[in-house]
Amino acid sequence: MKSLLMRSPIAVALFWITTYLVCTVFPLLVLLLYPPTPNADRGWWVEFSVALGFIGLAMMALQFALTARINRIEASYGVDIILQFHRYTSIVAFVFILVHPVILFIEDPETLGLLNVLEAPWRARFAVAATLALTALIATSIWRQRLKIPYETWRILHGLFAVLALSFGLAHILGVSYYLSLFWKVLLWSAIALTALWLWVYVRVVKPWLMLKKPYLVEEVIEQRGDTWTLALRPHGHPGFTFNPGQFAWITLDISPFRMREHPFSMSSNGDNSERLEFSIKALGDFTQGIKDVKPGTKAYLDGPYGVFTSDRYEDTSGFVFIAGGIGITPFMSMMLTHAQRGDDERPYLLIYAAKSWDDITFRDELGEISQRINLKVVYVLREPPEDWTGDTGYVDRDLLERYLPRRRGTRQYFICAAPVMMDAVEAALHDLEVPVTNIHMEHFNMV
């Protein structure tokens, strides 16, 4: 599978999109086999609303697969894109499921009485409960920060609401049983729901248990420039893992992996060295502010590696252009260190590194050493330069890129990792400079 991904990532991505669409509509199509006896009271709009309900429920079941961090799927898109897709399709599923009863209420106002959960049949109670759970799931996700829900608490509630919505939804369609009158249809939908619930159990129980058996120990914490700290880990009692340079892992530090308090960070070390993994983390929030105080010997657990933001997917390219902003230098350090260790000293590397000041240039000394081992040109861009600064200033814009990019721009791969505003501006500038969209790759800071 890995070799296939390397050869044709677009084809594999299209395969998974097709698979998702098929899985969404296939359960509905199966229901049309041996349909129930036509009912004169069930008009076109009623049947349409039922179809929306079934599609929405199938989409809800598929959300469990999207968030299970399945390597073969993730390797086609990257976790950040999958999570964005998960957010949008969840809203679409919510709309489908919500429209389903609205149409019924419009077609037959007497069905409004089913909202009286004290007197309504159980199938209607399950429908109301599923809708409320799904509404709570969507609301707490969209307005989590506004509601000031801690991330760990939100993750627990998110999983609970998702399980309740799917379980009550399945109970509802089994209770109605109009389209599930045949045993094999009941078996199909039960299998869909049970598979989704198993994925939830795997993510919340099985995977943390597996991580518990492969701990890491903090070897040292190294202070870097730019209020950044490098957390160095060694595997304890197991060989660890290698990774494609530029990938990331989820870190659980000094607590049980069952706590679900994990944070994604890119590795900044050599991807071919499994004996020592390094994560360079800028002090920006509550968790990252405490990295400097972590003591050697502290236990850590890793879930990874993940990500498609890696130079290893483009081994045949003639060169690389890396554009970093601030701590966005981290994945590029991993790429350059790994390629330097592999002896890749012929292909040209261009690093455009933007920061607030000269003191904010993380890995300044290390970049000087790497430039002696590979064909690397570094361009620093400072927003607040010192008085004697003779380099570039301001922002990475179209004019700056035009000065440094090679003339044959379609022969290199372009990687961008920075704050969202800078990434959007650089992406637009690269398009203006006619860099092929297939040659542009971006990594977002925040996925959660």
Image (cartoon, grey):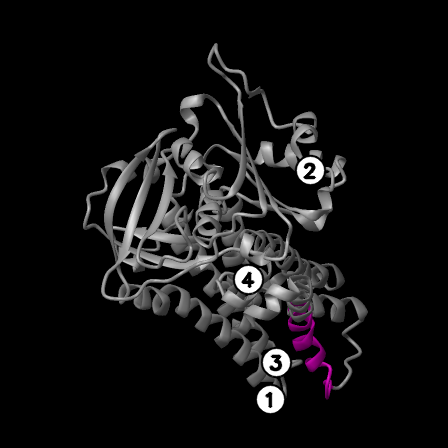
Q: Which residue is drawn at 77% across and 80% down?
A: 39
In three-dimensional space, the C-alpha distance between marks 1 and 2, rounded to whole angstroms, equals: 61 Å
In three-dimensional space, the C-alpha distance between marks 3 and 4, rounded to whole angstroms, equals: 39 Å
Q: Which residue is drawn at 71% across and 70% down?
A: 51
**Residue 75: which disc?**
4
Say which amino acid is labelled 3. Ser
Q: Mark 1 points at which residue?
A: 184
Tell us which disc is closer to us: 2 or 4. Answer: 2
Q: Nearer the viewer, residue 389 or 178?
A: 389
Q: Are marks 3 and 4 in contact (CB under 8 Å)?
A: no
Q: Mark 3 points at which residue?
A: 177
Say which amino acid is labelled 1. Trp
Residue sitting at the far top: 387
Q: What element carries label 4?
A: helix
Tell us which disc is closer to us: 3 or 4. Answer: 4
Tell us which disc is closer to us: 2 or 3. Answer: 2
Query: In the rendered image of this protein, does residue 118 appear above or below residue 148?
Result: below
Query: In the rendered image of this protein, does residue 112 appear above or below residue 415?
Result: below
Q: Do the residues labelled 1 and 4 touch (CB within 8 Å)?
A: no
> How would you rate the neighbour count of disc 2 (Cα within 10 Å): few for under 14, some for 14-19, many for 20 or more?
some
Magenta stretch holds residue 31: yes
Tell us which disc is closer to us: 1 or 4. Answer: 4
Q: Magenta-highlighted stretch: main secondary structure? A: helix
Tell me if 182 is positioned left or right of 331 in this view.
right
Question: Can residue 121 be seen in this snapshot?
Answer: no
Q: Mark 2 points at which residue?
A: 406
> How would you rate the neighbour count of disc 4 (Cα within 10 Å): few for under 14, some for 14-19, many for 20 or more?
many
Query: In the rendered image of this protein, does residue 410 appear above or below residue 378?
Result: below
Q: Nearer the viewer, residue 90 or 378?
A: 378
In three-dimensional space, the C-alpha distance between marks 2 and 3, rounded to whole angstroms, equals: 65 Å
Percent position of residue 251, x then y: 35, 52
